[in-house]
């Protein structure tokens, strides 16, 4: 895992201004220094004055120090890379007659694969990645982001100057920007989930997207989307169980091969993380609990069952309101954009986990792909009325009464504090409709919507919290093969007889205790912030208060600059690792 950054300056194509490329090297160093924690093992940068590339490296697979950036044999291509390509050995095998390899690095494989196939090479990658390749002959820079959106990539472009980075704060070293009050995705989802961000002219490269910039200008496109790669899965439950079991196991095992370190597993006591732990058999298992606040905030019993199932001790972290107040500004600093306070749970547990592991596994993504959210019951239940013979000629009355499936899901996912704002509502309806229109299944439509929206902020927070401690999170269940399978199978295997995530729970019985597989009281990683804030007499959840508080944390750090770059007063004791603090 690493942090990458760079620039492309069209004004420098014909003649370099005075002081270049030295000024470019100084800028790259500043952009890398501010995200040192993303790659504390090695750093390097390069510029010819037109394009600059920089990379901080966290060594996982290849622990040797190779020159950064990576160059091909004739040095016409330069690459910086963030992430892991788990199947790089297979890809390397197909390239060995065409190229000589100086290392056992997936980064070098990516470089030569790009040299042979361009952007299309990423179609064969199984992993999480974001990379940039500069072709010095064409004076062309290409950015590529992974299929699912695990590894971040942002860019700024004003028609002439172009800057990119793994984190927005690196770009802010190069440009002056201001608050973007026209970020509609934030208005309706509480988080930024599409190209626009809360910083003007700073954009997010989307999952499966590439960007190419040269003297001709900038263009973007997609080399992979879920809907273009969906498999045709037969309506055969026994076959689905066999094939999906093999696929789940392979996705987990693939992410445990290239570690070169002890790895851990973060469990909540739910089905998903329990499967990951059972298959991966990690050295360490961690969980968080708030049992000091009662059973509503604890799943410790189930996490203990997971640990017992695989014969490993359970490391328990009990965050408090004091931890919350101490860390919240630091978390906002690392997130770059407003997130949710589920990031607090991960931040606290990773502080402990990072003391013994450089890699950990989680169960993120399976709810979106295989119908795990309870809200899916609502639309799925409504659809059953269409199957009544008596209503076969009255679909227009059903929609008049209920609203269309898109309208119903818009009402469910709308987190705007102004639910009557026509502009926000039109944006949200168009967004949800664009995903529902990609499938004939209501259940798949809900899943696709959540994959492209809410899952993106989950992956965003996971990346930022793990990188804050210079460790790597691997999420087997967002393997792109699982997406292609999950959105291709009949949706009755997602929600069946009132059971969400039905086929996953059936498969889970083979690996985990039945008590976990049959749970109906899943809580997830949640902190009792509603209690800490005193929302309502019994700590009732306050959506507006939550959004305002999270936004205020972000605003204080990035807009008001209340703390400077690194929040003051958060350095902790001498000698303690302190993400976000100056070195």
Image: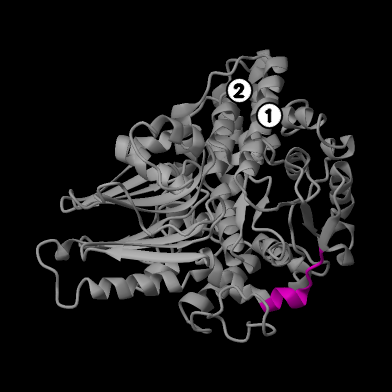
Q: Quadrant of residue 408?
A: top right
Is residue 175 something that shows in the picture?
no
Image spot of residue 375 (x, y percent): 68, 41
Relative to 85, is 401 above or below? Answer: above
Q: Nearer the viewer, residue 361 or 434?
A: 361
Give the numbered dot on residue 318. Answer: none
Q: Residues within 10 Å of mark 2 (few under 14, many from 20)?
A: many
Q: Nearer the viewer, residue 554 or 564?
A: 564
Q: Which color scheme did the rendering employ for the protein?
A: one colour
Q: What is the span of residues highlighted in magenta in the rendered image?
A: 317-326
Residue that label 1 marks: 494
Image point 84% across, 43% down: which residue? 310
Residue 322 sits inside the magenta stretch: yes
Image spot of residue 484 (x, y percent): 54, 29
Q: Quadrant of residue 466?
A: bottom right
Q: Residues within 10 Å of mark 1 (few under 14, many from 20)?
A: many
Q: Quadrant of residue 99?
A: top left
Q: Nearer the viewer, residue 485 or 193?
A: 485
Sequence-earlier tag: 1 or 2: 2
**Mark 1 to mark 2 CA distance (whole Å):** 9 Å
Residue 362 sits inside the magenta stretch: no
Give SS at disc 1: loop
Q: Is residue 91 left or right of residue 156?
A: right
Residue that label 2 marks: 489
Q: Nearer the viewer, residue 394 or 418?
A: 418
Identity of the residue furthest to the left in this view: 14
Image spot of residue 40 (x, y percent): 53, 67
Give SS at disc 2: loop
Helix, strand or loop: magenta stretch: helix
| Circles 1 and 2: CB atoms closer than 8 Å | yes
Image point 71% across, 29% down: which residue? 495
Q: Is residue 351 left or right of residue 231?
A: right
């Amino acid at each position: 895992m690493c942090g990458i950054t760079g620039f492309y300056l069209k004004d420098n194509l014909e003649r370099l201004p005075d002081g270049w490329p030295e000024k470019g090297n100084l800028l790259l160093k500043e952009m890398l220094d501010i995200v040192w924690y993303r790659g504390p093992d090695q750093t390097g940068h390069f510029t010819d004055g037109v394009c600059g590339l920089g990379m901080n490296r966290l060594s996982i697979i290849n622990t040797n120090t190779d020159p950064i950036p990576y160059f091909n044999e004739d040095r016409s291509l330069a690459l910086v890379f963030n992430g892991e390509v788990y199947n790089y050995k297979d890809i390397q095998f197909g390239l060995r007659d065409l190229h000589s390899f100086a290392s056992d690095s997936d980064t070098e494989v990516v470089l030569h694969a790009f040299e042979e196939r361009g952007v299309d090479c990423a179609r064969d990658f199984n992993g999480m990645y974001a990379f940039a390749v500069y072709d010095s002959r064409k004076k062309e820079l290409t950015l590529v982001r992974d299929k699912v959106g695990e590894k971040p990539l942002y860019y700024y472009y004003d028609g002439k100057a172009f800057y990119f980075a793994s984190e927005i704060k690196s770009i802010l070293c190069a440009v002056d920007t201001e608050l973007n009050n026209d970020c509609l995705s934030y208005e309706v989802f509480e988080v930024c989930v599409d190209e626009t961000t809360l910083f003007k002219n700073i954009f997010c490269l989307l999952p499966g997207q590439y960007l190419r910039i040269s003297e001709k200008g900038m263009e973007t496109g997609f080399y992979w989307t879920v809907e273009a790669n969906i498999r045709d899965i037969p309506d055969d439950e026994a076959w689905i169980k066999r094939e999906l079991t093999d696929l789940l196991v392979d996705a987990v095992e693939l992410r445990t091969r290239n570690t070169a370190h002890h790895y851990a597993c973060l469990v909540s006591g739910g089905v998903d993380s329990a499967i990951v732990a059972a298959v991966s058999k990690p050295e360490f298992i961690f969980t968080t609990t708030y049992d000091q606040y009662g059973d509503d905030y604890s799943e410790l019993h189930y996490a203990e069952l997971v640990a017992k199932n695989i014969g490993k001790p359970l490391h328990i972290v009990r965050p408090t309101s004091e931890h919350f107040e101490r860390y919240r500004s630091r978390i906002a600093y690392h997130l770059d954009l407003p997130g949710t306070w589920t990031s607090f749970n991960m931040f606290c547990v990773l502080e402990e986990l990072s003391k013994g592991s450089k890699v950990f596994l989680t169960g993120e993504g399976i709810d979106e792909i295989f119908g795990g959210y309870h809200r899916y019951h609502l639309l799925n239940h409504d659809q059953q009325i269409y199957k009544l013979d008596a209503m076969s000629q009255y679909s227009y009355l059903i929609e008049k009464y209920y609203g269309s499936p898109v309208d119903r899901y818009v009402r469910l996912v709308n987190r705007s504090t102004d639910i009557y704002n026509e502009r926000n509502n039109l944006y949200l309806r168009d967004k949800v409709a664009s995903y529902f229109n990609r499938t004939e299944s209501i259940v798949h439509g809900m899943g696709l919507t959540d994959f492209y929206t809410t899952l993106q902020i989950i992956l965003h927070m996971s990346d930022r919290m793990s990188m804050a401690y210079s460790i790597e999170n691997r999420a087997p269940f967002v393997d792109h093969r699982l997406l292609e399978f999950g959105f291709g199978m009949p949706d009755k295997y997602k929600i069946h007889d009132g059971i969400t995530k039905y086929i996953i729970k059936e498969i889970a019985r083979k690996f985990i205790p039945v008590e976990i597989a049959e749970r109906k009281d899943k809580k997830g990683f949640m902190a009792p912030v509603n209690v800490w804030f005193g929302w309502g007499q019994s700590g009732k959840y306050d959506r507006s208060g939550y959004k305002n508080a999270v936004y205020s944390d972000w605003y204080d750090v990035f807009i008001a600059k209340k703390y400077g770059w690194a929040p003051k007063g958060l350095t902790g004791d001498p000698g303690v690792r302190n993400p976000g603090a100056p070195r």
